[in-house]
Amino acid sequence: MSYFGTDGIRGKFGELPITPDFILKLGYVTGQVLIENNDNPARRPSVVIGKDTRLSGYVIEGALQAGFNAAGVDVHMLGPLPTPAIAHLTRSFNADAGVVISASHNPYYDNGIKLFSGDGKKLTDEMQNAINDKLKIIMSIGGNVSDNNNDLVMPILDPAQLGKNNRINDAKGRYIEFCKGSFPYQYDLSHLTVVVDCANGAGYSVAPRVMRELGANVIAINNTPDGLNINADCGSTHPEGLQKAVVEHEADVGIALDGDGDRIVMVDEAGNLVDGDGILYVLATQGQSKAKGVVGTLMSNMGLELALKADGIAFTRAKVGDRYVMHELEANGWILGGEPSGHILCLDKSRTGDAIIAGLQVLAVMQARGRALSDLVEGFEVLPQKLVNVRLSQMQDPFEHEELVTAFEKAQATLEGRGRLLIRQSGTEPMIRVMVESDDEIECDVLANDLADHIKAVLG
């Protein structure tokens, strides 16, 4: 059993694994792994902890802090900041790990934990497995008190060995300067009006400031988080409000983040949506130098693959999840990759997916080319694609049911040579994602919904 999904640990707050008791143990065993891997005994391991704007983040933050301290690890508290900011500051503070408290694009009642290694990249499989193994042990033992300190699930240290806490007051400023430093110095944004949808999430403060400090006329929307309105009909998963605002304000471009600020979608001056595939196309074909290759995922539109091929740019697909995109980029020695959902990795600028930095690179292309975003995506024709999410009562594998496998094979044969079928289990929740891609939009819709209904009928 693994407590980790494709992007950390995630779930509904108050239900395992997102309970204060579990999170306390997670902090403790993660601290143990850091101590075991510490190659400098004279230096106590340290972690940085950041979060998004969910109310439950306060509870989780306290539990994590206590767990790390109990293990003998120092904690630097960063407050609400985007996930990529935590990755950057993990390196900046020479910490041994970075922790993000966020459920990304999920509703406010969910929360989760993402972990970064000391180099600002997603945690290695080896370290994640080591943490998971300790979690399984500590959860199987329980939390019973013993007269013998050595028998406790979390042995009590000599108080002199406990970790310390401190709050970093200039964390936002450090990250803002890092983002601004990714933008070409010879340009500024003084000629642009930019609408920024902050999703009432972790980027609500820093994203508008970055754009303003680079000269843009910024119109910020959904930038008043109350702990409950994160991702609520706003941000990258609900860009309709941004599309309307761009047109109403006659803006040049719109940028939407998700709740933890690592995903981006954009809107052109006419209110048309440009998703992660469109952003990859612009950066790969019209950036300062043409990309050698691009890594997409199984969800990337076939139109992106065809457009890049026409431009002489190699393209390969990774499994869904930015950690797998990163693996493929490193294996190929490339720097650009991402997902349609808006995880964009520009490894020459940042070590993880960063919505603000990716957006700045597109704005830099607009400046360098002297062209609107709508002009930059003209060579990218999106094939019709339909995605249907089938929510289940519990995690189930559809490929264990012969009746469903037969239906999938029949659908794939129908699409052969002109489209794709992808059936994927969510790594974080009991959901099956059905994606159909075809040169026929009506066929996409009908086939995807028919397969979704079939899955519901079989799995419930």
Image (spheres, rainbow, N blue to C red):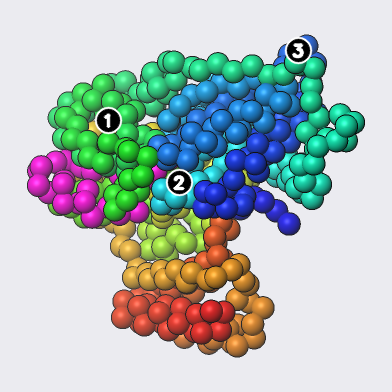
Note whether 298 is above or below 132 in the view shown. Answer: below
Q: Which residue is identified by label 3?
A: 160
Residue 372 to residue 214: above or below: below
- Residue 3 on the magenta segment: no
Q: Earlier in the sequence, mark 2 or mark 3?
A: 2
Question: Of label 1 and label 2, which has the lower sequence position?
Answer: 2
- Asked if residue 355 lies left or right of residue 242, the reply is right
176 or 139: nearer the viewer: 139
Q: Viewer-nearest of labels 3 and 1? A: 3
When the figure is inspected, residue 415 is found, relative to residue 161, above or below; the finding is below
Mark 1 crowd level (few <14, some 14–19, many ≥20, 10 Å Cα) = many
Q: Which mark is residue 208?
A: 1
Dot 2 corresponds to which residue?
Answer: 104
- Using the image as rendered, state which of residue 259 and residue 451 is in the foreground: 259
Marks 3 and 1, how far apart in space? 43 Å
* In-front residue for pair 207/342: 207
Give the percent coordinates (x, y) of residue 420: 47, 73
Q: In which quarter of the image is residue 230?
A: top left
- Identify the residue at horizontal 56%, vertical 84% (top origin): 458
Q: Which of marks 2 and 3 is in front?
A: 3
For the record, the magenta segment spans 236-261
**Could you tell me which residue is drawn at 44 percent across and 20 percent down?**
171
Question: Looking at the image, which residue is at 40% across and 22% down?
Answer: 172
Rendered location of residue 76, percent (x, y): 56, 21
Residue 104 visible in the picture:
yes
Q: In this view, does 41 lie to the left or right of 215?
A: right
Question: Quick check: 401 left or right of 428?
Answer: right
Q: Does the magenta stretch include residue 240?
A: yes
Q: What residue type is labelled 1?
A: Pro
